[in-house]
């Protein structure tokens, strides 16, 4: 038997007569209603219940309806819950200010049941149409994007697009049966594991990790993750973009500095990237790695076909970005031995 979810109204009202009357109206019209006496209880219920509409009296415990809206604004904007204000009488100036503030609609006293229900149903209908349009747009993007995308819920891969299947070499995909570890080398990558958990647990809304190797492949990808839902079913959307930097190294074969050294430097500098939004360039990592091997400035310049002055400038940038005072400190911070 399919149970149809009833629309949930959150009524912020301390007047018992008004509360009883509106409660009766909405229940008879097949709505669920939760009544709270103040703004602080309303904030808790928004988090707990995710109401479909908030209805609030224009005066409540010394606050005006406009003040209550401002107090609830962050919660309303992040969840998209419409806010309806009860007013004692029609006041054009107040209505204009309310609409400019962001209030969605108004209910005027004396109450007329049909008008109230019609207004609420109109609001809900608009929300449903908007959500349906957003879902349709997202599904088209998810399905047809040339970038590999996966949705993860509770550490399991819920779904993937065609580009992801091509990247990971998947012929058939079964939802909620696989983890990222099944398709990417993650066993010793604590940075990726920690970033994934922080995003799924709501500590970070976005994160990125560079240089993840696709299993049974020489391809490396950069991972970009955004949290799309948190709570009991915590979910994240992940894009996998081929790492041009590392894949270029792989395609060139032998190189003066190893992929493992490059990745270790990237992992260490991920901390700097998050804190200062200032990541080392490929050339800066290369020069730092050669410096760690004991090459002097002129030797590095000759080896890379650049001037000694350019090498000095790159080393100066490395020290600035790593917050160190000399190249030895920078090497210790960037390169794993």
Image (cartoon, rainbow, N blue to C red):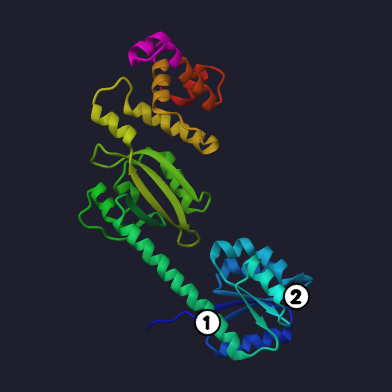
Where in the figure is residue 91, as x and y percent of width and height? 72, 78
Kindly indicate the quadrant of the structure image that contains residue 222: top left
- For disc 2, the marked residue is 59
Magenta stretch: includes residue 300: yes
Q: Position of residue 163 (x, y in %)?
A: 27, 51
Q: Nearer the viewer, residue 94 or 234?
A: 94
- Seen at 54% across and 83% down, the residue is 31
Which quadrant holds the N terminus?
bottom left
Q: Main secondary structure of the magenta part?
A: helix
Distance from disc 1 to disc 2, alpha carbons, whole Å, reads 24 Å
Q: Quadrant of residue 185?
A: top left
**Residue at 46% across, 31% down:** 268
SS category of the residue bearing label 1: helix
193 to 253, vertically: above or below: below
In this rendering, position of residue 147 left or right of residue 99: left
Residue 181 against residue 90 in the figure, above or below: above
- Residue extending furthest toward the left: 171
Q: In this picture, which residue range is highlighted in magenta?
A: 293-311
Quarter of the figure with residue 244: top left
Whether the magenta-drawn stretch holds residue 81 is answered as no
Quadrant containing the C terminus in the rendered view: top left
Q: Earlier in the sequence, mark 1 or mark 2?
A: 2
Residues at discs 1 and 2 in contact (Cβ within 8 Å): no
Query: Residue 121 shows which numbered tag?
Result: 1
Q: Which mark is residue 182?
A: none
Residue 38 visible, this orientation:
no
């Amino acid at each position: 038997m399919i149970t149809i979810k009833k629309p949930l109204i959150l009524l912020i009202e301390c007047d018992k007569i008004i509360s009883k009357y509106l409660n009766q109206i909405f229940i008879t019209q097949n709505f669920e209603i939760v009544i709270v006496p103040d703004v602080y209880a309303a904030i808790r219920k928004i988090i707990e219940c995710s109401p479909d509409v908030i209805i609030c009296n224009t005066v409540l415990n010394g606050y005006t309806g406009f003040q209550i809206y401002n107090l609830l604004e962050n919660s309303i904007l992040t969840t998209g819950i419409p806010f309806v204000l009860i007013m004692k009488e029609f006041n054009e100036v107040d209505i204009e200010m309310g609409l400019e503030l962001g209030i969605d609609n108004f209910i005027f006293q004396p109450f007329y049941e049909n008008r109230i229900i019609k207004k609420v149903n109109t609001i809900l209908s608009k929300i449903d149409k908007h959500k349906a349009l957003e879902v349709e747009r997202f599904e088209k993007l998810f399905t047809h994007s040339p970038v590999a995308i996966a949705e993860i819920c509770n550490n399991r891969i819920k779904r993937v697009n065609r580009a992801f299947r091509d990247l990971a070499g998947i012929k058939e995909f079964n939802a909620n049966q696989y983890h990222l570890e099944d398709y990417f080398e993650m066993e010793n990558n604590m940075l990726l594991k920690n970033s994934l958990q922080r995003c799924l647990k709501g500590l970070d809304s976005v994160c990125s990790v560079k240089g993840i190797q696709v299993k049974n492949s020489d391809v490396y990808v950069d991972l970009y993750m955004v949290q799309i839902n948190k709570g009991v079913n915590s979910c994240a959307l992940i894009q996998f973009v081929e790492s041009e930097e590392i894949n270029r190294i792989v395609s060139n074969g032998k190189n003066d500095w190893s992929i493992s050294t490059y990745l270790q430097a990237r992992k260490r500098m991920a901390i700097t990237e998050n804190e200062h939004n200032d990541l080392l360039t490929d050339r800066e990592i290369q020069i730092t790695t050669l410096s760690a091997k004991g090459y002097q400035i002129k030797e590095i310049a000759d080896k890379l076909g650049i001037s000694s002055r350019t090498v000095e400038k790159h080393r100066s940038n490395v020290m600035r970005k790593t917050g160190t005072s000399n190249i030895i400190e920078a090497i210790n911070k960037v390169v794993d031995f």
